[in-house]
Amino acid sequence: MSYLSLTDADREEMLAAIGVSSVEELFEQIPPDVRLGRDLDLPPALPELELVRHLTELAERNAHTGVELSFLGAGIYDHYVPAVVDVLLSRGEFLTAYTPYQPEMSQGVLQAIFEYQTMICELTGMDVSNASGYDGSTVAADACFVAKHTSDRAKVVLAETLNPQVRQVVKTYARGFDLEVVEVPHRGGTIDPEELAAASSDAAAVIFQQPNFFGCLESAPDLAAAAAESGAHPIAHVDLVSLGLLEAPGAYGCAIAIGEGQSVGCPPLYGGPHYGFFAARQEFTRRMPGRIVGETVDLDGQRAFVLTLQTREQHIRREKATSNITTNQTLLALAGSVTLTWLGPQGLREVGETCVALTAYAKERLDLPLAFERPTFKEVAVRLPRPARDVIRDARGRGVHPGYALGRDYPGMDDVLLVALTEKRTPADVDRLAEVLEEVC
């Protein structure tokens, strides 16, 4: 069956309407050496029934958390997403809404974004939040751009315990920003504040992660103080779930708080799409990337919401723009605000407490040496008697994904497995993990 209703007669009619005689003439200005010059190498077309069957077979090759017991984390986590999220996000007002440039037509969307911003500010202890970012990596690059333009410095310092993907994105953007990137190595799983302070001389910003990529809790107040004393902007890359228990970055002196919002409101989704969050102190408002929704009053004196403090298309102003990323993930950010509303402060705290308790139980039950003797939140790194990638392969053959192989990103850690424990796991699940690891190790 044909999936395109376009006939030869339709094609001829359209060509005549635009004044060209053929498709070849339409593309004649494209140089021959950049054309493919042949048909695409595709298999023959299939009838719809066979195509659905083929795609179903391909999809069944993927293992999701409904069929495989997963302890995989390393930045993307299997937290519970309440049913109300899909119900609300499926409403046309949110699902098909364009950027709300016309406030008279968009009060519902604007209010929802404003409430998201308010929640992010409350959790991070910051003065202002944008309407979300693309993901947790690009908001880190944006934060470096903000720091450069508000400090007149051209160096950023990254903790080695910062998510490797975040560090890579920052390095990629740094070439365009003319930024020098310096990394501070970890000592036993965390960053030494004195070493960070020494590296921060003449730096525009220092970015560290709390909890860090190894699952360990950094001495975040000391790291923020070390950066500030060097004149650099302290930037904390944080997990929203952790902020139900841990101190807000604004409370220990950070200038900017950023992070990946996936853990609140979004399934893993094969690594994306998700949303990033960006919150800062008041003095950075004009330099913040993305859109900001503000509260005002209308002509009748009624409460109203508008996009504020930025020109409509500032993102296309090249080096003068606060960000060249002209999109974000507002629909998914709203999933985060729905989830936070559903949980409430006490619910968020209980999720965090559950993660901490399960992690403590895993340390005891797995009976494997810890890679780092540090306090943890929802991940623990353990050493294995075999290479972690081999253990993961064999464990998955038994229906359990045991975690992330840190050797993929850190030399000398080929035997280290990073195990994530969210509130969706149970003590019985941890027992199952321990049994499988004992079998394959």
Image (cartoon, rainbow, N blue to C red):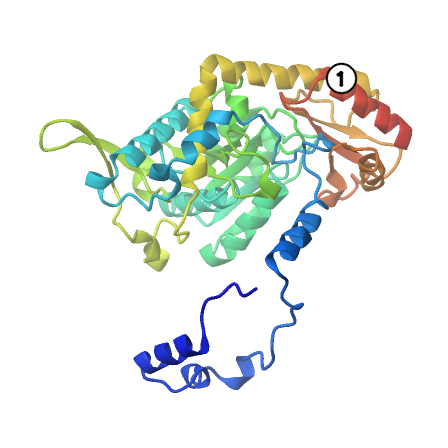
Q: Taking 404 as reference, is 226 left or right? A: left
Residue 283: image x %, image y %? 31, 35
Question: In the rendered view of the protein, which quadrant contains the C terminus?
Answer: top right
Tell me if residue 48 can be seen. yes
What residue sits 19% from the left and 39% below the top? 104
Residue 407: image x %, image y %? 76, 42
Question: In the rendered view of the protein, which quadrant contains the N terminus?
Answer: bottom right
Q: Taking 88 as reference, is 41 left or right? A: right
Nearer to me, 208 or 12: 12
What residue sits 38% from the left and 30% below the top? 116
Nearer to me, 228 or 45: 45
Q: Taking 383 as reference, is 83 left or right? A: left
Provide the residue designation for mark 1: 428
Give the answer, above or below, for where 16 lies relative to 422.
Answer: below
Give the answer, above or below, for where 268 lies relative to 432.
Answer: below
Give the answer, above or below, for where 397 lies relative to 125.
Answer: below
Residue 134: image x %, image y %? 46, 44
Nearer to me, 251 or 40: 40
Residue 359: image x %, image y %? 69, 19
Tell me if residue 254 can be seen. no
Give the answer, above or below, for where 201 lies relative to 321.
Answer: above
What residue sits 52% from the left and 39% below the top? 200
